[in-house]
Amino acid sequence: MNKEEIRRKIEKVFSKDVKRHKITDFSQMCRMWPMHDPPDTLEHTKPILDLGNEFNFTIFEDEAVEIYDMTAIEAVEYIYQLLIEENKNKSAKNNF
């Protein structure tokens, strides 16, 4: 999956959760959650579950916190790196 495909998937999730604003590269990912009452944990929130579903992997709390604090363009790069790492792990398992 290339970075443009990742960007489109992030845009799809962002637009579900932030209906009033169009995403740009500099949109803050934290806008997918209510600013007046942010969740204590992010791992099982709708935006994180939606992102995980789009990319077919589980996003754990540490990763969710990282994504929360990113801009959209930073999230593209971060998820791209997560996908690379996941593919490496799958390849290593298949070699055994």
Image (spheres, grey):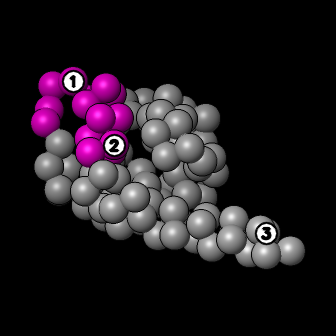
Compare marks 2 and 3 and give the one earlier in the sequence: 2
Q: Which residue is drawn at 30% across and 52% down?
A: 5
> Residue 18: horizontal and vertical position, in percent?
26, 29
Q: What stretch is highlighted in magenta?
A: 8-22
Q: Nearer the viewer, mark 2 or mark 3?
A: 3
Q: What kind of residue is marked 2?
A: Lys
Q: In this view, does 83 lie to the left or right of 27?
A: right
Q: Which residue is drawn at 17% across and 42% down?
A: 23
Q: What kind of residue is marked 1?
A: Lys
Structural crowding at the residue carrying mark 1, measured as other residues with C-alpha within 10 Å and reported as few (<14), some (14–19) or many (≥20): few
> Residue 77: horizontal and vertical position, in percent?
35, 67
Compare marks 1 and 3 and give the one earlier in the sequence: 1
Q: Identify residue for label 2.
A: 9
Q: Identify residue for label 3.
A: 93
Residue 19: mark in rendering: 1
Q: Is residue 71 visible?
A: no
Q: Is residue 34 left or right of residue 40?
A: left
Who is closer to the viewer here, 79 or 93?
93
